[in-house]
Image (cartoon, grey):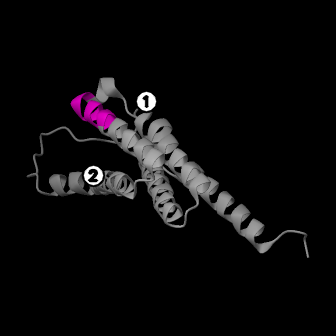
Amino acid sequence: MFGSSPRNAANAYSKVSMETGVLAADPHKLIVMLFDGALLAIVNATQQIGAGKIPEKGRSISHAIAIVESGLRASLNKEVGGDLARNLDALYGYIVKQLLLANLHNDVDKLFESQKLLGELRSAWEQIAPVKVAQAEQNERVNVPFDSLAPRKSSHFSA
């Protein structure tokens, strides 16, 4: 009716949905979305190797590498993050190397290793979600004995 195939409509809807999700996401959720995108690209590449779709496999792996390099790795602040950020940087570098080798040799084992590492990082990242941190802080406050002389945090402004 509108001169557009259902597939094109579905792709347009998916793109708008993703863009809306990105605009509405907090920084923590954006990192989860980067992990999800890289993991999906790796799964696609694995399937494409099995189907003999080599050009598509190359595009999927390139997409995963771009997400790891330009998204996850680029978001690290090595000055503030200290050893943790430096270790993550090295791990992301290793994952990129594995992805490059997987692409070069059609090596699904290297794809599986990259998928496993990124999946573990994603899981760890989800464990430190801001809501969970806020809940842990609230639990700590509940267990602190009341001290009538202790200063209290206030959200009110005084003039």
Numbered range of the magenta stretch: 82-90
Q: Give the residue pinned by disc 2.
A: 133
Residue 135 lies, in percent from the top left, at 26, 57
| Distance between mark 1 and mark 2 Cα atoms | 32 Å
Residue 45 lies, in percent from the top left, at 50, 58
Residue 124 lies, in percent from the top left, at 28, 53
Whether residue 27 can be seen here: no
Residue at 81% in and 71% down:
5
In the displayed structure image, the side of residue 16 where residue 25 appears, left or right: left
> Looking at this rendering, what residue extends furthest in the bottom direction?
1
First in sequence: mark 1 or mark 2? 2
Disc 1 packing (10 Å; few <14; some 14–19; many ≥20): few
| Residue type of the residue flagged with mark 1 | Ala
Q: Give the residue pinned by disc 1.
A: 159
Quick one: SS at disc 1?
Answer: loop
Disc 2 packing (10 Å; few <14; some 14–19; many ≥20): few
